[in-house]
Image (cartoon, helix red, strand yellow):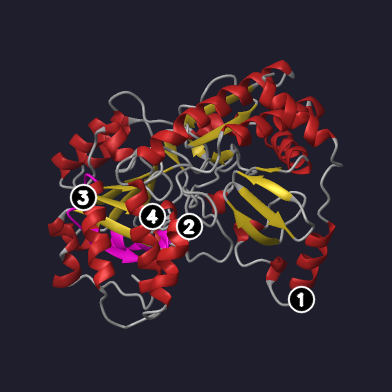
Amino acid sequence: MDDGAAAERANREQLPLASFEESRRAIEAASRFMPGGVSSNFRLGMVPHPLVMERSDGPYLFDVDGNRLIDYYLGMGPMILGHNPPAIRQAVIAQLERGLLYGAQSRLEAEVAELFCAMVPCAEKLRFTSSGSEAVQAALRLARAATGRRVIIKFEGHYHGWFDNILLSVAATPANGGDAAHPNRNPGSAGQDETAWGSVEVLTWNDLPGLQARLAVGDVAGVIMESAMCNAGAILPGAGYLQGVREACTKAGTVLIFDEVVTGFRVAPGGAQQVFGVTPDLATFGKCLANGFPVAAVAGRADLLDCFVSGAVHGGTYNAQPVAMAATLATLRELADGKVIAAIAPHGKRLMEGIASHLKEAGITASVAGFPQIFHVAFGLSQPATHYRDLLEMDRARYIRFCGELLKRRVRILERGAWFLSAAHDAGVIDETLAAVADAAQVVA
Protein backbone atom coordinates (compact mmCIF):
# COMPACT_ATOMS: atom_id res chain seq x y z
CA MET A 1 0.00 0.00 0.00
CA ASP A 2 1.38 3.44 -0.90
CA ASP A 3 1.68 6.29 1.60
CA GLY A 4 -1.50 7.99 0.40
CA ALA A 5 -3.62 4.86 0.81
CA ALA A 6 -2.08 4.14 4.19
CA ALA A 7 -2.93 7.64 5.40
CA GLU A 8 -6.50 7.35 4.15
CA ARG A 9 -6.93 3.99 5.85
CA ALA A 10 -5.64 5.43 9.13
CA ASN A 11 -8.09 8.32 8.83
CA ARG A 12 -11.01 6.00 8.11
CA GLU A 13 -10.18 3.64 10.94
CA GLN A 14 -10.92 6.48 13.32
CA LEU A 15 -14.49 6.61 11.99
CA PRO A 16 -17.21 4.10 12.87
CA LEU A 17 -18.88 2.26 10.00
CA ALA A 18 -21.49 4.48 8.39
CA SER A 19 -25.13 4.26 9.43
CA PHE A 20 -28.12 5.09 7.20
CA GLU A 21 -31.02 5.12 9.65
CA GLU A 22 -32.21 8.63 8.81
CA SER A 23 -32.37 7.67 5.13
CA ARG A 24 -34.38 4.58 6.04
CA ARG A 25 -36.87 6.63 8.04
CA ALA A 26 -37.15 9.22 5.27
CA ILE A 27 -37.84 6.56 2.64
CA GLU A 28 -40.47 4.94 4.85
CA ALA A 29 -42.18 8.32 5.26
CA ALA A 30 -42.00 9.08 1.53
CA SER A 31 -43.53 5.67 0.76
CA ARG A 32 -46.87 7.02 1.99
CA PHE A 33 -47.04 9.17 -1.15
CA MET A 34 -44.61 7.56 -3.64
CA PRO A 35 -44.37 3.82 -4.45
CA GLY A 36 -41.34 2.55 -2.58
CA GLY A 37 -40.50 6.12 -1.63
CA VAL A 38 -38.76 6.68 -5.00
CA SER A 39 -39.44 8.05 -8.48
CA SER A 40 -37.55 5.40 -10.47
CA ASN A 41 -37.46 1.62 -10.13
CA PHE A 42 -33.70 1.76 -10.63
CA ARG A 43 -33.43 3.28 -7.15
CA LEU A 44 -35.27 0.43 -5.44
CA GLY A 45 -32.52 -2.21 -5.51
CA MET A 46 -29.93 -0.26 -3.53
CA VAL A 47 -28.35 -1.67 -0.38
CA PRO A 48 -29.25 -1.42 2.40
CA HIS A 49 -32.17 0.65 1.01
CA PRO A 50 -32.59 3.81 -1.10
CA LEU A 51 -30.60 6.75 0.28
CA VAL A 52 -31.66 10.36 0.69
CA MET A 53 -29.09 13.03 -0.15
CA GLU A 54 -28.70 16.58 1.11
CA ARG A 55 -26.11 17.90 -1.33
CA SER A 56 -23.21 16.95 -3.59
CA ASP A 57 -19.82 18.35 -4.51
CA GLY A 58 -17.00 17.06 -6.72
CA PRO A 59 -16.71 13.28 -6.20
CA TYR A 60 -18.83 13.32 -3.04
CA LEU A 61 -22.42 12.93 -1.93
CA PHE A 62 -23.60 14.09 1.50
CA ASP A 63 -26.62 12.22 2.86
CA VAL A 64 -29.22 12.96 5.52
CA ASP A 65 -27.27 10.84 8.03
CA GLY A 66 -24.27 13.17 7.74
CA ASN A 67 -22.14 10.74 5.73
CA ARG A 68 -19.72 11.96 3.08
CA LEU A 69 -19.74 9.29 0.39
CA ILE A 70 -17.27 8.84 -2.47
CA ASP A 71 -19.66 8.46 -5.38
CA TYR A 72 -19.20 6.05 -8.27
CA TYR A 73 -22.91 6.09 -9.17
CA LEU A 74 -22.46 9.63 -10.52
CA GLY A 75 -26.21 9.93 -11.02
CA MET A 76 -25.99 6.54 -12.83
CA GLY A 77 -23.54 8.00 -15.30
CA PRO A 78 -24.17 11.65 -16.18
CA MET A 79 -21.79 13.49 -13.85
CA ILE A 80 -18.67 13.32 -16.03
CA LEU A 81 -17.39 16.65 -14.63
CA GLY A 82 -18.24 15.71 -11.06
CA HIS A 83 -21.03 17.02 -8.87
CA ASN A 84 -22.01 20.68 -8.96
CA PRO A 85 -19.13 21.95 -11.17
CA PRO A 86 -18.73 25.75 -11.31
CA ALA A 87 -18.90 25.98 -15.12
CA ILE A 88 -22.33 24.34 -15.19
CA ARG A 89 -23.67 26.33 -12.25
CA GLN A 90 -22.61 29.64 -13.75
CA ALA A 91 -24.12 28.85 -17.16
CA VAL A 92 -27.41 27.77 -15.63
CA ILE A 93 -27.66 30.80 -13.34
CA ALA A 94 -27.06 33.13 -16.27
CA GLN A 95 -29.84 31.49 -18.30
CA LEU A 96 -32.27 31.57 -15.35
CA GLU A 97 -32.12 35.35 -15.57
CA ARG A 98 -33.22 35.16 -19.21
CA GLY A 99 -36.07 32.68 -19.01
CA LEU A 100 -37.10 29.07 -18.44
CA LEU A 101 -39.22 27.89 -21.37
CA TYR A 102 -40.15 29.74 -24.55
CA GLY A 103 -42.23 27.37 -26.66
CA ALA A 104 -39.87 28.54 -29.39
CA GLN A 105 -36.26 28.16 -30.39
CA SER A 106 -33.29 29.70 -28.56
CA ARG A 107 -29.90 30.68 -29.88
CA LEU A 108 -28.38 28.29 -27.34
CA GLU A 109 -30.07 25.32 -28.99
CA ALA A 110 -28.45 25.98 -32.36
CA GLU A 111 -25.08 26.67 -30.75
CA VAL A 112 -25.19 23.35 -28.90
CA ALA A 113 -26.24 21.50 -32.04
CA GLU A 114 -23.34 22.94 -34.05
CA LEU A 115 -20.79 21.96 -31.40
CA PHE A 116 -22.36 18.50 -30.98
CA CYS A 117 -22.16 17.84 -34.73
CA ALA A 118 -18.52 18.92 -34.77
CA MET A 119 -17.70 16.40 -32.04
CA VAL A 120 -19.63 13.27 -33.03
CA PRO A 121 -18.62 11.41 -36.23
CA CYS A 122 -22.13 10.35 -37.29
CA ALA A 123 -23.84 13.65 -36.45
CA GLU A 124 -24.74 15.62 -39.55
CA LYS A 125 -27.95 16.75 -37.83
CA LEU A 126 -29.68 16.03 -34.50
CA ARG A 127 -32.88 16.35 -32.51
CA PHE A 128 -32.96 16.97 -28.77
CA THR A 129 -35.15 14.98 -26.37
CA SER A 130 -35.48 14.88 -22.60
CA SER A 131 -34.33 11.30 -21.95
CA GLY A 132 -32.38 8.48 -23.52
CA SER A 133 -35.54 6.36 -23.71
CA GLU A 134 -37.20 9.05 -25.82
CA ALA A 135 -34.15 9.39 -28.07
CA VAL A 136 -34.29 5.66 -28.79
CA GLN A 137 -37.97 5.89 -29.74
CA ALA A 138 -37.15 8.74 -32.12
CA ALA A 139 -34.36 6.70 -33.72
CA LEU A 140 -36.61 3.67 -34.24
CA ARG A 141 -39.28 5.87 -35.82
CA LEU A 142 -36.72 7.40 -38.18
CA ALA A 143 -35.44 3.97 -39.24
CA ARG A 144 -38.94 2.78 -40.11
CA ALA A 145 -39.93 6.03 -41.80
CA ALA A 146 -36.82 6.09 -43.98
CA THR A 147 -36.89 2.44 -45.04
CA GLY A 148 -40.60 1.70 -45.17
CA ARG A 149 -39.85 -1.50 -43.23
CA ARG A 150 -41.07 -2.58 -39.79
CA VAL A 151 -38.56 -5.06 -38.26
CA ILE A 152 -36.09 -3.84 -35.63
CA ILE A 153 -33.27 -6.05 -34.36
CA LYS A 154 -31.92 -5.63 -30.84
CA PHE A 155 -29.54 -7.82 -28.83
CA GLU A 156 -29.83 -9.88 -25.69
CA GLY A 157 -28.63 -7.99 -22.63
CA HIS A 158 -28.66 -4.56 -24.31
CA TYR A 159 -30.79 -1.86 -22.68
CA HIS A 160 -32.49 0.84 -24.74
CA GLY A 161 -34.97 2.37 -22.33
CA TRP A 162 -38.10 1.32 -20.51
CA PHE A 163 -40.75 1.65 -23.27
CA ASP A 164 -42.91 -1.38 -24.08
CA ASN A 165 -41.60 -1.92 -27.61
CA ILE A 166 -37.91 -2.21 -26.69
CA LEU A 167 -37.65 -3.43 -23.07
CA LEU A 168 -36.93 -6.99 -24.16
CA SER A 169 -34.41 -9.64 -23.08
CA VAL A 170 -32.47 -7.17 -20.96
CA ALA A 171 -32.03 -9.56 -18.03
CA ALA A 172 -32.61 -13.01 -19.51
CA THR A 173 -31.88 -16.03 -17.32
CA PRO A 174 -30.95 -19.64 -18.12
CA ALA A 175 -34.58 -20.53 -17.40
CA ASN A 176 -36.18 -18.15 -19.87
CA GLY A 177 -33.42 -17.21 -22.32
CA GLY A 178 -33.89 -20.06 -24.76
CA ASP A 179 -31.30 -21.05 -27.36
CA ALA A 180 -28.29 -18.72 -27.31
CA ALA A 181 -28.31 -18.54 -31.10
CA HIS A 182 -32.02 -17.61 -31.16
CA PRO A 183 -32.83 -15.93 -27.81
CA ASN A 184 -36.38 -15.74 -26.55
CA ARG A 185 -38.10 -12.37 -26.37
CA ASN A 186 -38.59 -11.74 -22.66
CA PRO A 187 -40.45 -8.62 -21.52
CA GLY A 188 -38.65 -6.70 -18.80
CA SER A 189 -41.72 -5.64 -16.84
CA ALA A 190 -45.17 -6.65 -15.77
CA GLY A 191 -47.82 -4.71 -17.65
CA GLN A 192 -46.02 -4.46 -20.99
CA ASP A 193 -48.20 -4.54 -24.10
CA GLU A 194 -47.00 -7.63 -25.93
CA THR A 195 -48.36 -6.32 -29.24
CA ALA A 196 -45.85 -3.45 -29.02
CA TRP A 197 -42.81 -5.64 -29.69
CA GLY A 198 -44.28 -7.78 -32.47
CA SER A 199 -41.82 -6.43 -35.03
CA VAL A 200 -38.78 -6.48 -32.72
CA GLU A 201 -36.43 -9.47 -32.90
CA VAL A 202 -33.66 -10.41 -30.44
CA LEU A 203 -30.29 -11.78 -31.53
CA THR A 204 -26.98 -12.60 -29.85
CA TRP A 205 -24.45 -9.76 -29.88
CA ASN A 206 -20.91 -10.41 -31.17
CA ASP A 207 -22.32 -13.09 -33.51
CA LEU A 208 -21.70 -11.56 -36.94
CA PRO A 209 -22.76 -14.56 -39.09
CA GLY A 210 -26.10 -14.70 -37.27
CA LEU A 211 -26.80 -11.03 -37.95
CA GLN A 212 -25.62 -11.23 -41.55
CA ALA A 213 -27.97 -14.13 -42.23
CA ARG A 214 -30.95 -12.29 -40.73
CA LEU A 215 -30.24 -9.05 -42.62
CA ALA A 216 -30.00 -10.92 -45.91
CA VAL A 217 -33.77 -11.45 -45.84
CA GLY A 218 -34.10 -7.74 -46.65
CA ASP A 219 -36.96 -6.70 -44.34
CA VAL A 220 -35.07 -5.11 -41.41
CA ALA A 221 -35.58 -1.38 -40.87
CA GLY A 222 -32.97 -0.92 -38.16
CA VAL A 223 -30.39 -2.62 -35.98
CA ILE A 224 -29.90 -1.07 -32.55
CA MET A 225 -27.08 -1.95 -30.18
CA GLU A 226 -24.85 -0.62 -27.46
CA SER A 227 -21.62 -0.25 -29.43
CA ALA A 228 -19.85 -1.33 -26.24
CA MET A 229 -22.10 -3.20 -23.84
CA CYS A 230 -22.06 -1.17 -20.61
CA ASN A 231 -25.45 -1.62 -18.96
CA ALA A 232 -25.51 -5.33 -18.11
CA GLY A 233 -21.70 -5.57 -18.03
CA ALA A 234 -18.62 -4.27 -19.79
CA ILE A 235 -18.38 -6.33 -22.98
CA LEU A 236 -16.38 -4.97 -25.88
CA PRO A 237 -17.13 -5.81 -29.52
CA GLY A 238 -15.07 -8.63 -30.93
CA ALA A 239 -12.34 -7.94 -33.47
CA GLY A 240 -13.97 -6.81 -36.71
CA TYR A 241 -17.51 -7.20 -35.36
CA LEU A 242 -18.66 -3.58 -35.63
CA GLN A 243 -17.02 -3.20 -39.02
CA GLY A 244 -18.83 -6.32 -40.20
CA VAL A 245 -22.14 -5.05 -38.84
CA ARG A 246 -21.61 -1.75 -40.62
CA GLU A 247 -20.98 -3.48 -43.93
CA ALA A 248 -23.95 -5.83 -43.52
CA CYS A 249 -26.36 -3.00 -42.70
CA THR A 250 -25.16 -0.93 -45.66
CA LYS A 251 -25.58 -3.90 -48.00
CA ALA A 252 -29.09 -4.62 -46.69
CA GLY A 253 -30.26 -1.01 -46.71
CA THR A 254 -30.78 -1.24 -42.94
CA VAL A 255 -30.28 1.69 -40.58
CA LEU A 256 -27.53 1.04 -38.02
CA ILE A 257 -28.20 2.67 -34.65
CA PHE A 258 -25.65 2.91 -31.84
CA ASP A 259 -27.06 3.51 -28.37
CA GLU A 260 -24.40 5.77 -26.86
CA VAL A 261 -26.45 6.97 -23.90
CA VAL A 262 -23.76 5.57 -21.57
CA THR A 263 -20.62 5.82 -23.73
CA GLY A 264 -21.34 9.11 -25.47
CA PHE A 265 -19.04 11.95 -24.34
CA ARG A 266 -17.65 9.62 -21.64
CA VAL A 267 -15.15 7.37 -23.42
CA ALA A 268 -14.20 9.98 -26.04
CA PRO A 269 -15.52 13.36 -27.24
CA GLY A 270 -17.18 11.52 -30.13
CA GLY A 271 -18.26 8.51 -28.11
CA ALA A 272 -17.50 4.84 -28.65
CA GLN A 273 -17.97 5.28 -32.40
CA GLN A 274 -14.86 7.48 -32.33
CA VAL A 275 -12.95 4.92 -30.26
CA PHE A 276 -13.84 2.00 -32.54
CA GLY A 277 -13.72 3.92 -35.81
CA VAL A 278 -17.15 2.74 -36.97
CA THR A 279 -19.80 5.31 -37.89
CA PRO A 280 -23.47 4.37 -37.48
CA ASP A 281 -26.35 5.93 -39.41
CA LEU A 282 -27.98 7.13 -36.18
CA ALA A 283 -26.89 7.29 -32.55
CA THR A 284 -28.63 8.15 -29.30
CA PHE A 285 -27.02 10.16 -26.52
CA GLY A 286 -27.90 11.23 -22.97
CA LYS A 287 -26.34 11.16 -19.50
CA CYS A 288 -22.98 12.97 -19.95
CA LEU A 289 -24.49 15.30 -22.52
CA ALA A 290 -25.55 17.84 -19.87
CA ASN A 291 -23.82 16.69 -16.64
CA GLY A 292 -26.98 16.13 -14.63
CA PHE A 293 -29.65 17.94 -16.62
CA PRO A 294 -32.36 15.96 -18.47
CA VAL A 295 -31.06 16.27 -22.02
CA ALA A 296 -30.71 13.58 -24.68
CA ALA A 297 -30.48 13.50 -28.45
CA VAL A 298 -30.73 11.38 -31.57
CA ALA A 299 -28.11 12.30 -34.16
CA GLY A 300 -26.99 10.99 -37.51
CA ARG A 301 -27.29 11.27 -41.26
CA ALA A 302 -29.00 14.41 -42.45
CA ASP A 303 -31.36 12.55 -44.81
CA LEU A 304 -32.60 10.44 -41.90
CA LEU A 305 -33.08 13.36 -39.51
CA ASP A 306 -34.88 15.31 -42.23
CA CYS A 307 -37.63 12.67 -42.09
CA PHE A 308 -38.85 14.67 -39.09
CA VAL A 309 -39.69 17.43 -41.55
CA SER A 310 -41.14 15.24 -44.30
CA GLY A 311 -43.53 13.06 -42.31
CA ALA A 312 -42.13 11.36 -39.21
CA VAL A 313 -43.52 13.03 -36.08
CA HIS A 314 -41.44 13.86 -33.04
CA GLY A 315 -42.44 16.22 -30.24
CA GLY A 316 -41.79 17.17 -26.65
CA THR A 317 -42.66 20.23 -24.61
CA TYR A 318 -39.33 20.27 -22.80
CA ASN A 319 -37.01 19.31 -25.67
CA ALA A 320 -34.07 21.76 -25.73
CA GLN A 321 -35.40 23.65 -22.69
CA PRO A 322 -33.14 26.75 -22.47
CA VAL A 323 -31.77 26.17 -18.96
CA ALA A 324 -30.89 22.60 -19.88
CA MET A 325 -29.31 23.85 -23.11
CA ALA A 326 -27.12 26.23 -21.12
CA ALA A 327 -25.89 23.25 -19.08
CA THR A 328 -25.36 21.24 -22.26
CA LEU A 329 -23.30 23.91 -23.96
CA ALA A 330 -21.13 24.38 -20.86
CA THR A 331 -20.61 20.60 -20.59
CA LEU A 332 -19.68 20.08 -24.24
CA ARG A 333 -17.26 23.01 -24.16
CA GLU A 334 -15.48 21.29 -21.26
CA LEU A 335 -15.36 17.96 -23.09
CA ALA A 336 -14.77 19.00 -26.70
CA ASP A 337 -10.96 18.89 -26.78
CA GLY A 338 -10.79 15.52 -25.03
CA LYS A 339 -8.51 16.69 -22.23
CA VAL A 340 -11.03 16.02 -19.44
CA ILE A 341 -11.77 12.50 -20.67
CA ALA A 342 -8.07 11.75 -21.12
CA ALA A 343 -7.28 13.05 -17.62
CA ILE A 344 -9.74 10.59 -16.08
CA ALA A 345 -8.02 7.63 -17.77
CA PRO A 346 -4.95 7.18 -15.51
CA HIS A 347 -7.08 7.39 -12.36
CA GLY A 348 -9.57 4.91 -13.78
CA LYS A 349 -6.83 2.54 -14.86
CA ARG A 350 -5.21 2.64 -11.41
CA LEU A 351 -8.57 2.04 -9.78
CA MET A 352 -9.30 -0.94 -12.04
CA GLU A 353 -5.89 -2.46 -11.37
CA GLY A 354 -6.15 -1.80 -7.65
CA ILE A 355 -9.58 -3.40 -7.37
CA ALA A 356 -8.40 -6.46 -9.26
CA SER A 357 -5.33 -6.74 -7.04
CA HIS A 358 -7.23 -6.41 -3.74
CA LEU A 359 -9.87 -8.92 -4.80
CA LYS A 360 -7.20 -11.40 -5.83
CA GLU A 361 -5.39 -10.93 -2.51
CA ALA A 362 -8.66 -11.70 -0.72
CA GLY A 363 -9.12 -14.86 -2.77
CA ILE A 364 -12.12 -13.51 -4.71
CA THR A 365 -12.36 -14.50 -8.37
CA ALA A 366 -13.43 -11.47 -10.37
CA SER A 367 -13.07 -9.77 -13.73
CA VAL A 368 -12.53 -6.01 -14.00
CA ALA A 369 -13.19 -4.89 -17.58
CA GLY A 370 -14.23 -1.89 -19.65
CA PHE A 371 -12.97 1.65 -20.14
CA PRO A 372 -11.13 3.67 -17.48
CA GLN A 373 -14.07 6.10 -17.43
CA ILE A 374 -16.73 3.35 -17.12
CA PHE A 375 -15.84 -0.20 -16.13
CA HIS A 376 -17.51 -3.25 -14.66
CA VAL A 377 -16.56 -5.58 -11.81
CA ALA A 378 -17.94 -9.11 -12.14
CA PHE A 379 -17.50 -11.45 -9.17
CA GLY A 380 -17.23 -15.09 -10.19
CA LEU A 381 -15.73 -14.51 -13.65
CA SER A 382 -12.07 -15.36 -14.18
CA GLN A 383 -11.85 -13.42 -17.46
CA PRO A 384 -13.84 -10.68 -19.19
CA ALA A 385 -17.20 -11.69 -20.65
CA THR A 386 -17.47 -11.87 -24.43
CA HIS A 387 -21.23 -12.54 -24.61
CA TYR A 388 -24.19 -11.63 -22.43
CA ARG A 389 -24.65 -15.20 -21.22
CA ASP A 390 -21.16 -15.20 -19.74
CA LEU A 391 -22.53 -12.67 -17.26
CA LEU A 392 -25.04 -15.22 -15.98
CA GLU A 393 -22.14 -16.88 -14.16
CA MET A 394 -21.55 -13.82 -11.98
CA ASP A 395 -21.87 -14.14 -8.20
CA ARG A 396 -24.36 -11.29 -7.84
CA ALA A 397 -25.23 -11.99 -4.22
CA ARG A 398 -21.62 -11.74 -3.12
CA TYR A 399 -21.07 -8.57 -5.13
CA ILE A 400 -24.08 -6.94 -3.49
CA ARG A 401 -22.56 -7.81 -0.11
CA PHE A 402 -19.39 -6.11 -1.31
CA CYS A 403 -21.42 -3.02 -2.24
CA GLY A 404 -22.88 -2.97 1.25
CA GLU A 405 -19.49 -3.24 2.91
CA LEU A 406 -18.07 -0.46 0.74
CA LEU A 407 -21.03 1.76 1.56
CA LYS A 408 -20.37 1.27 5.28
CA ARG A 409 -16.87 2.53 4.49
CA ARG A 410 -18.40 5.53 2.69
CA VAL A 411 -17.82 4.44 -0.90
CA ARG A 412 -20.96 4.17 -3.02
CA ILE A 413 -20.98 1.84 -6.04
CA LEU A 414 -23.71 0.52 -8.30
CA GLU A 415 -25.06 -2.89 -7.39
CA ARG A 416 -25.08 -3.97 -11.03
CA GLY A 417 -21.27 -3.83 -11.17
CA ALA A 418 -20.67 -0.58 -13.08
CA TRP A 419 -18.22 2.05 -11.80
CA PHE A 420 -18.41 5.58 -13.25
CA LEU A 421 -15.54 8.05 -12.83
CA SER A 422 -15.54 11.82 -13.14
CA ALA A 423 -12.98 14.57 -13.54
CA ALA A 424 -13.25 15.13 -9.78
CA HIS A 425 -11.98 11.64 -8.84
CA ASP A 426 -8.34 12.56 -8.21
CA ALA A 427 -5.43 10.53 -6.85
CA GLY A 428 -6.43 11.10 -3.23
CA VAL A 429 -9.98 9.90 -3.88
CA ILE A 430 -8.62 6.78 -5.59
CA ASP A 431 -6.32 6.15 -2.60
CA GLU A 432 -9.23 6.35 -0.19
CA THR A 433 -11.36 4.12 -2.40
CA LEU A 434 -8.73 1.41 -2.72
CA ALA A 435 -8.17 1.33 1.02
CA ALA A 436 -11.91 0.79 1.46
CA VAL A 437 -11.91 -1.89 -1.25
CA ALA A 438 -9.14 -3.78 0.55
CA ASP A 439 -11.13 -3.81 3.78
CA ALA A 440 -14.43 -4.74 2.15
CA ALA A 441 -12.85 -7.53 0.11
CA GLN A 442 -11.49 -9.16 3.24
CA VAL A 443 -14.92 -9.03 4.88
CA VAL A 444 -16.79 -10.66 1.99
CA ALA A 445 -14.00 -13.17 1.36
The amino acid sitting under disc 2 is Pro
- Lower position in the chain sequence, tag 1 or tag 2: 1
Q: Quadrant of the C terminus?
A: top right
Q: How many tags in the picture?
A: 4
Nearer to us: label 1 or label 4: 4
Query: Alpha carbon of mark 3 to alpha carbon of mark 4: how far?
Result: 14 Å
What residue sits right under mark 1 in the picture?
A: 32
Residue 300 in picture, x, y percent from top left = 22, 53
Of the residues under marks 1 and 4, which one precedes in the sequence? 1
Q: Position of residue 193 (x, y in %)?
A: 48, 66
Residue 412 horizontal side relative to residue 131, left or right: right
Please identify, in this view, whether the residue under mark 1 or under mark 2 is nearer the observer.
2
- Tag 4 residue: 331
Q: Looking at the image, which residue is at 76% across and 65% down?
A: 27
> In the image, what residue occupies the spot 28% across and 37% down?
274
Q: Amino acid at mark 4?
A: Thr
Q: Which residues are magenta?
A: 120-142
Marks 1 and 4 sit apart, C-alpha to C-alpha, by 37 Å
374 horizontally vs 6: left or right: left
